[in-house]
């Protein structure tokens, strides 16, 4: 039984416990220096002398199930909670595509103090070879994947110093074997690694379908591996968008750990999604859908009427399937979303039981779809779009960057404001103190204060020269920025006093 019913992005009890304990430790620490601390969408009552782990988790399950349904920034009162043991991952970590909660949120503060954000010079820099994979950070280590000289290389760095701890390489082409189109815009691996806090295992996926599991805590030795093209006879993606717009970028969607499964968008005739035993690589189940794989950055957990589910953007549209035992892989909803040149790149953005879809070309809109066990229902569709940046939802408003920054009302789709200049590549993070960190273009880093109009607090430009498709990451008061050429900078943020 899942301890935290209404947090679908928490996959199992161990992950739930470490997330809750890390959040509470952060709030308790802050409470000693000030009577209240603004925390995005979270509100707790005072709990005293709770030493029983199970009792505490039952209580938190009740509180947390209602908290995420509330809008606005809450005030966290004094807390006196004891009895939390060691956890497998810190709330400050960034172990997956779009972070710990896989939705662009972080428990970390932005580090904004009055008129200062971070030191101009990076704490350290590294060159990790070309590729659009985003860095992931867990237990003081940073992991990423890059390509050079006919090899993919998995790199493990000390997240605080940039020191190389280990690397592992294997032969791999620069592009997937059926690649067609836009090679000037990308190269090397694109799928972001996935770190499993319960086992310490790291999972990577190359453009050519090499799915590997690595022993991350030690020397990074390979635990198991499989090539998806070879094992499941995956074919080239069909031309579904028309206009002679055949595109195939290889494998670019990040794998996702859910409980004992590693779930991957394979796109084979046997199944669109496949789940593997995360420890052995043995296949456990395949999805009912047999759609080809799409081109988006990741899968999105969603809970539908109390049932854990997963949203995936196939080549032809949105797919939502069940993850509950005995019905895993069964489709509950499909929503058509064909895009010219198969350019459905933006990850489905989940908020409560809704999914936001957006892409350019023939679409050039953003659409909100509500999901139930009976299917998908369009709520609104408006003529604003993102071609790369996945939207985030903060205080019932939708934010993303594509050339400019957009802010929409989540309930109606009405645009509240538009502003700034951000270019085409981009990613956003919502911080615990309610700020928006925006990374993209050719190394443009901006801190935005959400409100009734566009308001920049701080800006840095031209940090790099190449396009910054990789997602920005924030962990342990450090901001990690990477470009497609493999340049990686770490900036130490200034903590709130």
Image (cartoon, rainbow, N blue to C red):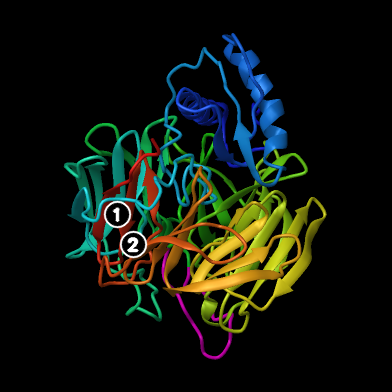
Q: Secondary structure at mark 2?
A: loop
Q: Residue at x 52, y 90 (%)?
A: 244
Residue 59, by quadrant, is top right
Residue range highlighted in magenta = 235-251
Q: Which quarter of the image is occupied by the C terminus?
A: top left
- Locate residue 227, reporting x and y percent: 38, 55
- Locate residue 139, reporting x and y percent: 34, 33
Q: Earlier in the sequence, mark 1 or mark 2?
A: 1
Q: Is residue 315 toward the left or the right of residue 415 in the image?
A: left
Instruction: Quickly name the residue at label 2.
Output: 189
Q: Which quarter of the image is occupied by the N terminus?
A: top right
The answer to whether 221 is drawn above or below residue 253 in the figure is above
Q: Is residue 266 magenta?
A: no
Camera-side residue: 362 or 335?
362
Q: Secondary structure at mark 1?
A: strand
Q: Residue at x 25, y 64 (%)?
A: 130
> Label 1 crowding class (10 Å Cα cut-off): few <14, some 14-19, many 20+?
many
Mark on residue 145? 1
Residue 288: in sight, yes or no? no
> Label 2 crowding class (10 Å Cα cut-off): few <14, some 14-19, many 20+?
many
**Residue most extreme to the right:** 374
| Separation of residues labelled 1 and 2 (CA atoms) | 7 Å
- Locate residue 340, reporting x and y percent: 56, 82
The answer to whether 120 is drawn above or below residue 431 in the figure is below
Residue 121: in sight, yes or no? yes
The answer to whether 48 is drawn above or below residue 314 in the figure is above
Q: Residue at x 61, y 84 (%)?
A: 362
- Locate residue 312, reporting x and y percent: 60, 58
User: Label 2 near label 1: C-beta < 8 Å?
Assistant: yes
Q: Main secondary structure of the magenta part?
A: loop
Camera-side residue: 35 or 320?
35
């Amino acid at each position: 039984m899942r301890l935290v019913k209404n947090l679908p992005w928490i996959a199992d009890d161990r992950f739930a416990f470490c997330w809750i304990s890390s959040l509470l430790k952060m709030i308790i620490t802050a409470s000693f220096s000030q009577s209240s601390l603004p925390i995005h969408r979270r509100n707790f009552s005072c709990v005293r002398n709770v030493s029983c782990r199970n009792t505490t988790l039952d209580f938190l399950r009740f509180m947390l199930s209602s908290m995420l349904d509330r809008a606005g920034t809450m005030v966290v009162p004094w807390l006196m909670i004891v009895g939390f043991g060691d956890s497998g991952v810190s709330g400050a970590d960034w172990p997956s595509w779009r972070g710990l909660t896989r939705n662009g949120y972080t428990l970390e503060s932005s580090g904004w103090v009055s008129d200062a954000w971070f030191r101009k010079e990076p704490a350290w820099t590294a060159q990790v070879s070309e590729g659009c994979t985003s860095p992931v950070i867990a237990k003081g280590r940073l992991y990423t994947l890059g390509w050079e000289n006919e090899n993919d290389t998995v790199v493990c760095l000390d997240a605080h110093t940039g020191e190389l701890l280990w690397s592992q390489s294997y032969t791999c082409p620069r592009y997937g074997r059926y690649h067609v189109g836009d090679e000037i815009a990308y190269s090397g691996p694109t799928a972001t690694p996935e770190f499993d806090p319960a086992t310490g295992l790291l999972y990577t996926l190359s453009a050519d379908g090499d799915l590997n599991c690595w022993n991350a805590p030690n020397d990074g030795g390979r635990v198991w591996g499989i090539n998806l093209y070879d094992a499941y006879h995956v074919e080239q993606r069909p031309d579904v968008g028309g206009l002679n717009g055949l595109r195939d970028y290889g494998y670019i969607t990040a794998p996702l750990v859910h409980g004992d499964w590693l779930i991957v968008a394979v796109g084979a005739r046997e199944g669109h999604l496949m789940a593997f035993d995360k420890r052995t690589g043995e296949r456990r189940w395949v999805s009912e859908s047999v759609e080809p794989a799409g081109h988006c950055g990741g899968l999105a957990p969603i809970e539908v009427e109390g049932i854990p589910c997963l949203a995936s953007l196939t080549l032809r549209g949105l797919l939502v399937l069940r993850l509950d035992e005995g019905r895993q892989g069964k489709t509950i909803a499909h929503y058509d979303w064909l895009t010219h040149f198969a350019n459905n790149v933006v990850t489905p953005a989940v908020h409560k039981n809704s999914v936001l879809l957006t892409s350019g070309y023939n679409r050039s809109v953003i659409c909100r779809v509500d999901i139930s066990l009976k299917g998908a229902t369009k709520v609104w569709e408006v003529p604003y779009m993102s071609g790369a940046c996945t939207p985030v939802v903060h205080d019932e408003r939708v934010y993303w960057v594509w050339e400019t920054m957009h802010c929409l009302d989540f309930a109606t789709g009405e645009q509240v404001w538009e502003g700034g200049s951000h270019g085409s590549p981009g990613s956003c993070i919502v911080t615990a103190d309610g700020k928006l960190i925006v990374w993209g273009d050719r190394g443009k880093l901006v801190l935005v204060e959400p409100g009734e109009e566009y308001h920049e607090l701080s800006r840095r430009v031209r940090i790099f020269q190449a396009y910054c498709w990789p997602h920005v990451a924030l962990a342990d008061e450090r901001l990690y920025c990477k470009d497609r050429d493999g340049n990686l900078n770490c900036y130490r943020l200034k903590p709130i006093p």
